[in-house]
Image (cartoon, rainbow, N blue to C red):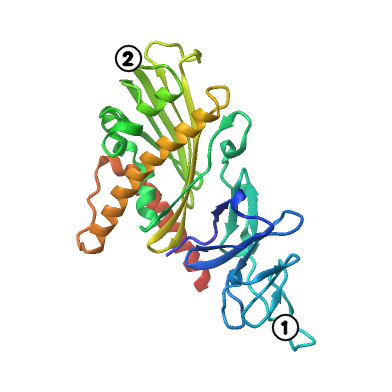
Amino acid sequence: MYLNNCWYVVAWSHEVSETTLLARRVLDKPILLYRTSNGDVVALADRCCHRHAPLSLGRREGDDIRCMYHGLRFDPTGRCVEIPGVLQVPPKVRVRSYPVFVRNRWVFVWMGDPARADETTLPNNFSCEHPDWRNLPGYLHYETPHELICDNLLDFSHLSYVHERTLGGSTEIAQSRPIVEDIPNGIRVTRHVRDVPPPPYHLTLRDLKGLRVDRWFKYDFVLPGTLLMESGSRPVGDADDDERRTVRMHSCQTLTPETASSTHYFFQQSHRADVGNESTTRALFEQLLVAFDEDKRMITAQSRNLLDSDEPMMTLWMDEALVRFRRLREKLIHDEQAQQSV
């Protein structure tokens, strides 16, 4: 079951152009994305209302889309404006159009009731496109349910073991207890890890070799599955306002269910623009891909195990944030279903 009345990220803005048609499945629904001649992004059901042929296999004619099965032509609102051999097109001949909003290079689509689409509920993914921050856009496709990836992002104790040689670097992360708070539409997690070796990827930004650092992770994890995180490290003993050896990062990551068993994962990890250069940004991105592949291998193996197990997963102390988030999401899905049945 999905939460429908939410903004889901369906693409990076550079993926949607004025010359191509992008097909993407979201919440088990096929969607067609393209840009009009004035640069607006359009999201239509990727299914002609006639014989359900994919419109993404059609062709552009100006800002319209021609279905290349029987020739119906649809405008950017989804209205059919031409049927070959028909003088007047019936108003009911149309395909669904989804509300779209582009913010900081993320393309959001509202999958539920269009009347409830509220741009004020969009997550603040500011570092995806901000002059003070540098990053490269990333995308992964998972053959696992999105809930398992949410669980992984809500419990950073796994950094000590899954990412022992990449993002982790010390067992103290797993031993530190985070502060977990409820916030509107999500969960806030704050974790401080004191007096530990710097993780390998921080050495790309600062000369911390041989030092010990204090690390922090503070992030909001908001519906439907978006992480917005401040993180960093500072050598033990350096003042809080001493930025000479401080590592500061901001990360935006979001999960969009493709189907019940597959997921789109859009992500970036930003560093301060006044530290390093383009090669630094590229090096950090390559290290992040290695770490995220570590996650993917573990979660994919976990998902396979769950397929043939009748036993529930055991809940332990480190699961507080993910349990709270699952409960919040399940409640809202239940509320949506209750409203639809009225």
Where on the picture, by quarter, is residue 289? top left
247 relative to 44 in the view: left or right: left
2 and 1 marks in contact (CB < 8 Å): no
Which residue in the protein does label 1 denote?
Answer: 83
Residue nearest the observer in this picture, 189 or 164? 164
Q: Amino acid at mark 1?
A: Ile
73 relative to 330 in the view: left or right: right
Q: Amino acid at mark 2?
A: Gly
| Rendered location of residue 105, percent (x, y) | 61, 45
Give the class, few, some or many, for how many residues have Cα within 10 Å of label 2's Cα (few <14, many ≥20): few
Give the class, few, some or many, for how many residues have Cα within 10 Å of label 1's Cα (few <14, many ≥20): some
Mark number, residue 210: 2
267 relative to 56 in the view: left or right: left
| Residue at 69% from the left image edge and 81% from the top image edge | 92
47 relative to 212 in the view: left or right: right
* Element marked by disc 2: loop
Residue 304 visible to the viewer: yes
Judge whether 74 appears above or below 125 on screen: below
| Rendered location of residue 114, percent (x, y) | 63, 63
Judge whether 16 appears above or below 252 on screen: below
Residue 271 visible to the viewer: no
| Rendered location of residue 40, percent (x, y) | 71, 55
Judge whether 11 appears above or below 28 on screen: above
